[in-house]
Image (cartoon, grey):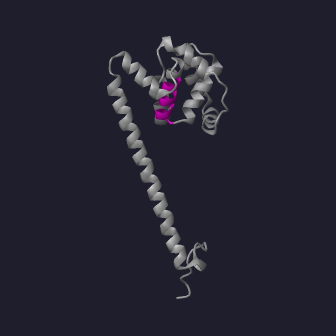
Amino acid sequence: MTVLSTFHVTAFVQTSFTSSHRSALCKLSAMKQPVGPLARLKKASDPDDYNRVVEEKMKKTGMSREEAEADYNAFLENPPFYYALEKKEEYYKSLGYKDIFEGMIGEAEKEGKGDEMRERLNKFRLQSKIKAAAVLVVAILGLFYIQTIYNADPEHFLKGGLPDYSRR
């Protein structure tokens, strides 16, 4: 087994929840999703490892084969970090919360740390907005720069091919 697949299996198994949360998650993950190209490639290139991981997931969580395959395919299609976030959001929705943020606040309030969690989430949202604005500013400035290059010499703008230095 390669290092990459060892990492994937370890991360896949670590993102599993406790037995009390499995039934709700199994129902949510059992929704039929189309199999993506990465999952198809993994299944075709190394079917033994794919089946081993699916069977291990079935044994640990009590899922059916179809549910375990759908869960593993979702894991393969999403990087482990996003897969874990998706599972957390499913978990909080199964508890009746609207989304992951509301769930995190609600669970923190049970521990008496609701204000601290709200502050952390507000800081996270602010940082995300700043990053998004920075990306947009860089993209717009890049387009303006390209426009100035075009305006300088519109006839020769992006003609394609390599420059011909043989005439010199």
Residue 54 placement (x, y as % from top left): 58, 22
Residue 12 placement (x, y as % from top left): 49, 27
Q: Is residue 98 visible?
A: yes
Q: Is residue 2 visible?
A: no
Say whether residue 127 is left or right of residue 157. Answer: left
Please tell me which residue is depicted at 58% across the width and 30% down the height of the picture. 74
Q: Nearer the viewer, residue 68 or 139?
A: 139
Please tell me which residue is depicted at 64% across the width and 36% down the height of the picture. 36
Please tell me which residue is depicted at 42% across the width and 42% down the height of the picture. 128
Residues in magenta? 79-90
Q: Quick one: which residue is furthest to the bottom in this view?
A: 168
Up-down: is 128 above or below 145? Answer: above
Up-down: is 14 above or below 19? Answer: below
Residue 67 placement (x, y as % from top left): 62, 20
Is 86 a magenta residue?
yes
Q: Quick one: which residue is furthest to the front in this view?
A: 115
Q: Nearer the viewer, residue 166 or 29?
A: 29
Q: Quick one: which residue is furthest to the top in this view?
A: 20
Rendered image quadrant of residue 75: top right
Is 68 a magenta residue?
no
Say whether residue 120 is left or right of residue 10. Answer: left
Please tell me which residue is depicted at 46% across the width and 32% down the height of the picture. 7
The secondary structure that dominates the magenta segment is helix
Tally of numbered discs: 0
Up-down: is 162 above or below 66? Answer: below
Residue 110 placement (x, y as % from top left): 38, 15
Q: Nearer the viewer, residue 35 or 129?
A: 129
